Amino acid sequence: MKLQQLRYLIEVVDSGLNVTVAAERLFTSQPGVSKQIRLLEDEIGVTIFERSGKRFIGLTSAGRQVIQAARRVMLEAENFKRIGEEFRDEAAGTLTVVTTHTQARYVLPRVVAEFTRRYPRVRLAIREGDPGRVVETLQRGEADLGIATEALGQAAGLVTLPAYTWHHCVIVPENHPLAGSNPLSIQHLAQYPLITYDPAFSGRTRIDDAFRKAGIVPNLVLTAVDSDVIKTYVALGLGVGIIAAMALDPQRDGSLKAIDTGHIFGPNMTRVGLRRGAVPRRFALAFIELLAPQLSAAVVTSASKEGGESYDI
């Protein structure tokens, strides 16, 4: 049995049982992947995949257990490497963080600036995607840390911890009729065309839930994944914006007025996640603590060892 065979096996499953896609992701040939899986099945004496002709159409009962064991073995193999790297040089290496645009644009610059000052020999990579992609990238082991508001809370195979809470705000041009509304009601807000996030982003669930509970169907004229896009169209007078309060810069966005809506949409929780059972490098723990000071190295390490999924502290 070879680690390569286990890697191929996991990639086929993560590619939706599509061997062609798996081979492309592995930078190898489809026949090579199929051959290694057959050799693995012969060695352990069980059929891993249900087949229809040459196509894989599902996992057998034994296969489901094999894939779980394969993931554990590959994770521990990665842990061996991390432990070696840590003891060779605890201040050098690579840290990959996957997050959403809002976090990368408005929250992480401060963290990244201090992190790179402390760890100048760590190669830091920030990857962006929607919350679902954050989870998928982390689960596949393609990132060390994930940061998002949506999706991370109940993701399988991950340990996630609360980093910080934030609220939405309404933004309007300074001369807009809502500019003087304090406090603003959801009924009053619903009288105007609205511009906010795409359903998968930045706490959109909270916004939808608030309107649903009020029995109101909002007039959403535009949705976007980027707060800057929302602000641009609000400034053009195309509608009232609902964005994460952190995304409004009083100096850069001086032509827009923010109206607090914490009482309407409630708080959102941004969480930080890592794979359950993974041994994080010391600089990864430092990055987390820079993002959320209450998440000390001891707290994160303890949560990871306990093997749970979603933690509140």
Image (cartoon, helix red, strand yellow):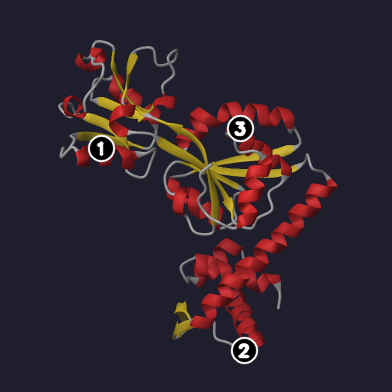
Q: Earlier in the sequence, mark 3 or mark 1?
A: 1
- Above or below, 70 against 201 in this view is below
What amino acid does circle 3 point to?
A: Pro
Asked if residue 284 lies left or right of residue 214, the reply is right
Q: Residues within 10 Å of mark 2 (few under 14, many from 20)?
A: few
Identify the residue position indicated by label 1 in the image.
210
- Above or below, 154 against 265 in this view is below
Q: Earlier in the sequence, mark 2 or mark 3?
A: 2
- The quarter of the picture where residue 150 lies is top left
The CA distance from mark 3 to mark 1 is: 31 Å
Which residue is located at x 40 percent, y 36 percent? 268
What amino acid does circle 2 point to?
A: Gly
Identify the residue position indicated by label 2 in the image.
45
**Could you say where residue 306 lies in the image, as x and y percent from the top left?**
61, 56
Instruction: Please say whether residue 110 is visible from this viewpoint.
Output: yes
Residue situated in front as seen by the camera: 15 or 197:
197
What amino acid does circle 1 point to?
A: Ala
- Which label number is shown at residue 293? 3
Asked if residue 193 lies left or right of residue 223, the reply is left
- The quarter of the picture where residue 286 lies is top right
**Residues at discs 3 and 1 in contact (Cβ within 8 Å):** no
